[in-house]
Amino acid sequence: MLKKLYAILLLVILISSLDAMASHIVGGDFTYRYLGDTSISGVTHRKYKVSLYIYQDCQNGVAEAIAQDNPAYLTVYENDGSIVQFDTNIVYDATPNSGGSISVPANFSNDCVKNIPQLCLYRKRFEKTYYLKPSNVGYVVVYQRCCRNANIANVVDPGDKGASYYCLIPRTTVTNNSAVFKNYPPQVICQSNPLYYDNSATDADGDSLSYEFCPAEEGASGPDIKPRIASPPPFDTVDYYPPYSFS
């Protein structure tokens, strides 16, 4: 799952200018923590706290679109495509110093940037605790939001293509916590210049982590920019203009 989050995040942070609508979101990822088991009506459930993080351009993004991100809509599916539940009232914690809303530091140093432009990036955290019944196939938690920057040069019709962010929770016989990135994403990347960035992560279970590029996945579109119920996986992937591809 980490590799999918990395690819989505990298693709969106390469975008520097944003249009109105809902293209203020410039990336996101999920994490989850296993909090033990609990019995509900005599059935043992696995308790997980799921955290969605989205990054918002508060310099160029439309304030109305930013406000519309709250609350977040999350949908839970079993990995066979069966819907489990959907939640439409997950709000971030706006309490100062709570970590629910953070102004992300610039976090970059690059010789190509002589005069640092005006930057503003928020990170919003939305959390939900789930009590999941035993499952032989596991679960997927999905968040979908439209749209991408209409000026993206290598994607077909980007202004009508949103993104899917999701995490995979394994079957009941496996106890797992997700990996967590160490650093915030860089806010400025210069074309044709080397980028040195520590994209490493930590894993509470000590699992081995690997990274790879994968295609950007769609989720939501212009007619429904914030679906109350997200579509289930597998997700469609964006079409790239030749000679570009995800690889």
Image (cartoon, rainbow, N blue to C red):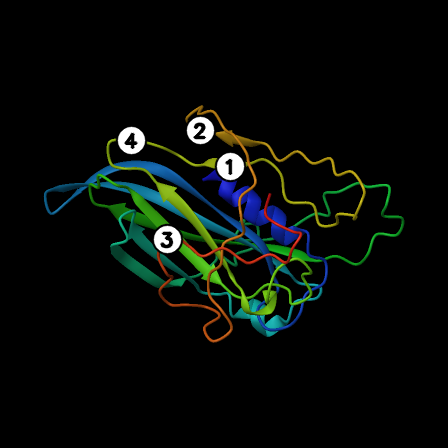
Q: Do the numbered discs 3 and 2 sit on residues whose CB atoms are within 8 Å? A: no
- Report if residue 59 is visible in the image: yes
CA separation in Å, label 3 and label 4:
21 Å
Q: Amino acid at mark 4?
A: Val
Q: Amino acid at mark 1?
A: Val
On screen, residue 135 above or below 66: above
Q: Do the numbered discs 4 and 1 sit on residues whose CB atoms are within 8 Å? A: no
Task: Please name whichever residue, 173 or 151, is drawn nearer the observer in this view of the structure.
Answer: 151
Residue under pointer 4? 174
Task: Please name whichever residue, 30 or 237, is drawn nearer the observer in this view of the structure.
Answer: 237
On screen, residue 36 above or below 205: below
Residue under pointer 1? 180
Q: Position of residue 176 (x, y in %)?
A: 36, 32
Q: Amino acid at mark 3?
A: Pro
Residue under pointer 2? 204
Residue under pointer 3? 233
Lower position in the chain sequence, tag 2 or tag 1: 1
CA separation in Å, label 4 and label 1:
19 Å
Lower position in the chain sequence, tag 3 or tag 2: 2
Residues packed near mark 3 inside 10 Å, few (<14), some (14 to 19) or many (20 plus): some
CA separation in Å, label 3 and label 2:
27 Å
